[in-house]
Image (cartoon, coloured by chain):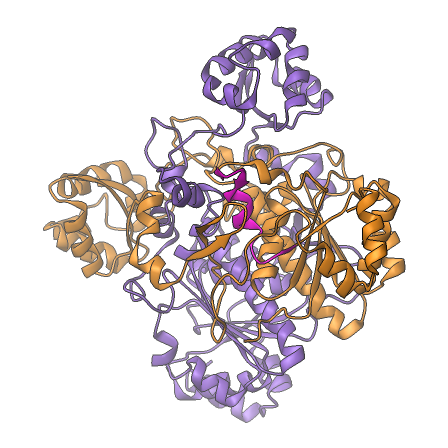
Chain colours: A orange, B purple
């Protein structure tokens, strides 16, 4: 069964999470992603928990569907292998510190000479230019400097980091979009593009209305906990046996909620008669709603609130989400037998659902250099002698 | 200057944030995005704060670079306009509740008959099938049900929502990727694809290692505040005049930090001699580090910590980020004169930086139906009489 990116070859020099997240999307949808790692060492995530049998579940998850080539890019013989591959490739992606590829002699200007069709993408903390370009960064740095932490959490709690590394994975998503745009364009123009994604830009660009609120009104957006400052009721609430979330986005929802609560008079209450007034008195409104919700279980409330067509959510733990029937129907967990771990592991599948495509993991993550022979002989036509020599010199 | 998606026509039926975030990426990079809205009413975000002069900054921000067509899709004349446009278009995207497009007679099966090259993408809360498919959802519902809230916040704080609506914008990013994959594939096959993105799947797929931790080790991941459970020190810290973040990802960073603190002996301390031990004793380690950091200002610490090449971040507010010189160099704020608001507003630019492209806003967000005449006469070749008739019937 055809996948959309069949025939696209990606040379993947990325490490850790941001770059590999990008190439995972490409690999899941049919691109041949050649994961290039240092011989005997590999990506740093090969040592990240959860580990089993000396192999990492983290690595396995985000590198499924890729094939493995080992290259020590500091050796001239390995550089030549890389340059030979560039001639055959469509895309090169890297997330080294800014300047590393140039120092290796493998910068965009060099690769473009060899293959003008090449699409070359980088992810860095702050981008390729500017006062902070040379600084190293982790996701938490981008979360802090983008303002993300300042708007996440409760008014009385400190600035709060998002659980997962969203500066990493969203940068990977943007690079993936850029690569795909450039691939499409190249069908028309025949030439590639240079792409430059920064984690700081990335998180700054997903702030929804926080930035525009400030630039238009001069305000400093602050932390609102789980509530929405512009809609009410729209928050998490206590029930008898736990918490849940619900949100009313339009007037009629509040009317139906007030009726379900047995307090239809709330709709005429001068504190609550419009959304703007409800936002102003949201603490009072929440207290009234919780007088009702704390008399019922979450399951009882789910039935009532879903019944009146108000968006409702259980606050689930990761194990609860993993076993949710909706996640099963959507095939959001893939089982894959992982060599090294020597067992079948369960990893999140792709959320890009395309009809007419078999939605499964095609191959496990590679061992370091697992596909050296295949790539060097079949793709590059190297002789057995040449491959043996590369091995001997420690280039692969 | 050419942009990569020039020549791609998108019929954009999306509302609110998730779908418009997707088509904003396409419009920013050269696609002709025709934003279709109900005559006289428009997208719900036209009424969302910040408002000025009766026009919304929120709407203006996420709909820049699009053109406006008004259509009342319940009227047969408007349906015909839409179907005529489908014949000329590459992409249709929508984020109505599941089933609405079919009820309108504009489902994928219908459009595919008219134009087999059409790429048709949907965003919904839970996807097109499964027990929850019919339920309405907001971002907060996906954040709750995906487990995201369970892993964000502090151990002693409640499950915490991410500040912005990341279930919305990341779903938009995934739909954008899917559309671009399908556009590329269509160059090879000549046929389109049906895409189906769910907010719940989306947030479940960006959990980094939380899911695999659970599936491989049976654990229930919990909230870790700003610290990283697998690296230490890696957290937010108090200084004399505020907080900051730093992270040590490799052993040598901790050695340099201990020296900078004037406590090189920490490296041999049996509690701190390896990363695993530091993670176990991270509270003790944090207390020792803060004995040092609370004697200095954030600015002093920035100089020291950046100087020893450890990733460091100021925890900035949105106004502070907006005026940061790195954001300026990266051109991450675009100025655009917005009709309706009748003023120049400042909105976040695109983080997908492509060399050789002028990085700016090409046109402000449209007024409702602003480009009706142009689209109907130039694109569809309708006569002035026909357009007048459509107006008279309230179809446009």
Q: Quadrant of residue A324?
A: bottom left
Using the image, determine if residue A57 lies above or below residue A370.
above
Give the image location of residue A346, x and y in percent: 43, 51
Using the image, determine if residue A66 lies above or below residue A37.
below
Q: Horizontally, is B210 left or right of B257 in the view?
A: left
Q: Nearer the viewer, residue B20 or B172?
A: B172
> Can see residue B346?
no
- Quadrant of the image for the N terminus of chain A? bottom right
Q: Nearer the viewer, residue A102 or B77?
A: A102
Q: Quadrant of residue B354?
A: bottom right
Q: Is residue A152 magenta?
A: no
- Name the residue located 84 percent from the left edge and 58 percent from the top edge: A84
- Name the residue located 55 percent from the left edge and 23 percent from the top edge: B275
Give the image location of residue B121, x and y in percent: 49, 71
Q: Is residue A62 magenta?
A: yes
Q: Nearer the viewer, residue A238 or A5?
A: A5
Q: Horizontally, is A132 left or right of B15 in the view?
A: right
Q: Which residues are magenta?
A: A50-67
Q: Nearer the viewer, residue A295 or A97?
A: A97
Give the image location of residue A8, x and y in percent: 69, 66
Using the image, determine if residue A258 lies above or below residue A287.
below
> Can see residue B147?
yes
């Amino acid at each position: 069964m055809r996948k959309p990116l069949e025939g696209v070859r990606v040379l993947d020099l990325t490490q850790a999470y941001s770059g590999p997240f990008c190439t995972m999307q490409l690999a899941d949808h049919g691109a041949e992603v050649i994961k290039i790692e240092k011989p005997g060492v590999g990506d740093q995530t090969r040592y990240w928990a959860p580990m089993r049998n000396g192999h990492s579940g983290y690595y396995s998850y985000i590198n499924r569907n890729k094939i493995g080539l080992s290259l020590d890019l500091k050796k001239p013989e390995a550089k030549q292998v890389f340059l030979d591959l560039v001639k055959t490739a469509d895309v090169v992606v890297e997330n080294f510190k800014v300047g590393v590829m140039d120092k290796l002699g493998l910068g965009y200007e060099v690769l473009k000479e060899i293959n003008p069709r090449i699409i070359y993408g980088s992810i860095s903390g702050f981008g390729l230019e500017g006062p902070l370009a040379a600084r190293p960064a982790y996701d938490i740095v981008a979360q802090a400097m983008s303002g993300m932490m300042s708007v996440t959490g409760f008014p009385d709690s400190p600035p709060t980091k998002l659980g997962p590394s969203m500066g990493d994975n969203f940068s990977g998503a943007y690079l993936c979009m850029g690569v795909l745009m450039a691939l499409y364009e190249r069908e028309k123009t025949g030439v590639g593009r240079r792409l430059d994604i920064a984690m700081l830009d990335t998180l700054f660009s997903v702030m929804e209305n926080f930035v525009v609120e400030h630039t238009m009104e001069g305000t400093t957006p602050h932390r609102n906990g789980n509530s929405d400052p512009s809609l009410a009721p729209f928050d998490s609430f206590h029930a008898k046996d736990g918490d849940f979330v619900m949100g009313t986005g339009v007037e009629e929802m509040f009317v139906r909620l007030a009726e379900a609560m047995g307090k239809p008079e709330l709709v005429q209450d001068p504190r609550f008669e419009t959304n703007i007034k409800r936002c102003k008195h949201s603490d009072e409104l929440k207290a009234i709603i919780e007088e009702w919700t704390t008399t019922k279980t979450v399951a009882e409330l789910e039935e009532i609130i879903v019944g009146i067509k108000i968006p409702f959510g259980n606050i689930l733990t990761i194990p609860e989400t993993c076993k949710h029937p909706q996640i099963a129907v959507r095939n959001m967990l893939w089982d894959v037998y992982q060599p090294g771990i020597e067992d079948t592991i369960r990893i999140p599948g792709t959320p890009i659902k395309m009809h007419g495509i078999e939605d499964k993991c095609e191959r496990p993550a590679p061992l370091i250099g697992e596909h050296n022979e295949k790539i060097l002989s079949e793709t590059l036509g190297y002789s057995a002698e040449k491959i043996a020599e590369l091995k001997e010199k420690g280039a692969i």
